[in-house]
Image: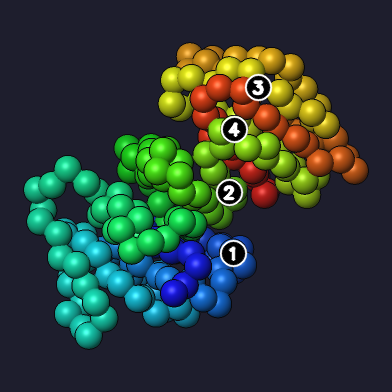
């Protein structure tokens, strides 16, 4: 069985090479609806296609396909993540899921929370950054990233400690109504270390502006 599930959404991708650099040879690829437009540029055939096909035509090919109803609670991408969990994956990479419509971007960020709540690990990669949900395990950011941000999107994020960064934190609380953790910088020659005492935070590593 492949070690990781890659979910491809329909958002615009400009820097295909930068995104493809994250792929592994044994990844399992799920393309969601109009996300199939990225298949040729990625040169990674779909292992599974999922969608209600409201934004693209059902390709109607031999690849396993799950056709969803138009009226449903799950977005195509959220359903794909749940399907990946059902199939036994613990690690997820999501691409083509940010940018464009803000509501879709925020909804897809919620997938990282859902995965974390199910003891799974997910990373969103786009043209400029990589995004993951962190909690009780320490996280690190090397100085190859010009910026990184910590955001509270779950409601509770206390006891935050950040070392080896331009703006260190010691036992801080990140709140949803004040972006204290936005746009920090790693001290050159160091690796930033992030620890959270209670709750979760969205860690955004910015590769380039």
Mark drawn on residue 136: 4
Do the residues bearing badges 1 and 2 touch, measured as CB atoms within 8 Å? yes
What separation in Å lies between label 3 and label 2 (alpha carbons)?
Answer: 20 Å
Q: Which residue is mark 1?
A: 22
Checking the image for residue 160, the label placed there is 3
**Figure quadrant of the N terminus:** bottom left
Q: Earlier in the sequence, mark 4 or mark 1?
A: 1
State the separation of the CA atoms marked 2 and 4. 19 Å
**Sequence order check: which comes first, mark 1 or mark 2?**
1
In the picture provided, is 38 more to the left or to the right than 173?
Answer: left
Q: Position of residue 207 (x, y in %)?
A: 67, 49
Q: Work out whether residue 41 can be spotted.
A: no
How crowded pointer 3 is (Cα within 10 Å; few <14, some 14-19, many 20+) is rated as many
Q: Position of residue 83 (x, y in %)?
A: 29, 58
Foreground mark, 4 or 1, reads 4
Q: Which residue is mark 2?
A: 130
In the picture, measured across the screen, residue 61 lies left or right of residue 46, that is left
């Amino acid at each position: 069985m492949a070690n990781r599930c890659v979910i491809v959404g329909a958002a615009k991708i400009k820097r295909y090479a930068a995104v493809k650099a994250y792929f592994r040879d044994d990844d399992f690829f799920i393309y969601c609806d109009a996300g199939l437009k990225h298949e040729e540029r990625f040169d990674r055939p779909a292992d599974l296609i999922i969608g209600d096909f409201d934004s693209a035509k059902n390709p109607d090919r031999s690849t396993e396909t799950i056709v969803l109803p138009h009226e449903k609670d799950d977005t195509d991408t959220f359903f794909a993540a749940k399907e990946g969990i059902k199939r036994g994956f613990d690690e997820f990479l999501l691409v083509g899921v940010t940018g464009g419509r803000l509501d879709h971007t925020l909804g897809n960020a919620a997938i990282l929370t859902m995965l974390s709540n199910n003891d799974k690990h997910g990373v969103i990669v786009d043209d400029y950054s990589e995004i993951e949900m962190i909690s009780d395990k320490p996280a690190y950011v090397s100085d190859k990233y010009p910026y990184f941000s910590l955001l509270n999107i779950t409601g509770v994020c206390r006891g935050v400690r950040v070392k080896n960064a331009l703006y260190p934190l010691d036992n801080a609380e990140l709140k949803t109504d004040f972006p204290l953790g936005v746009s920090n910088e790693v001290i050159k020659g160091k690796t930033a270390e992030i620890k959270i005492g209670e709750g979760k935070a969205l860690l955004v590593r910015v590769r380039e502006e």
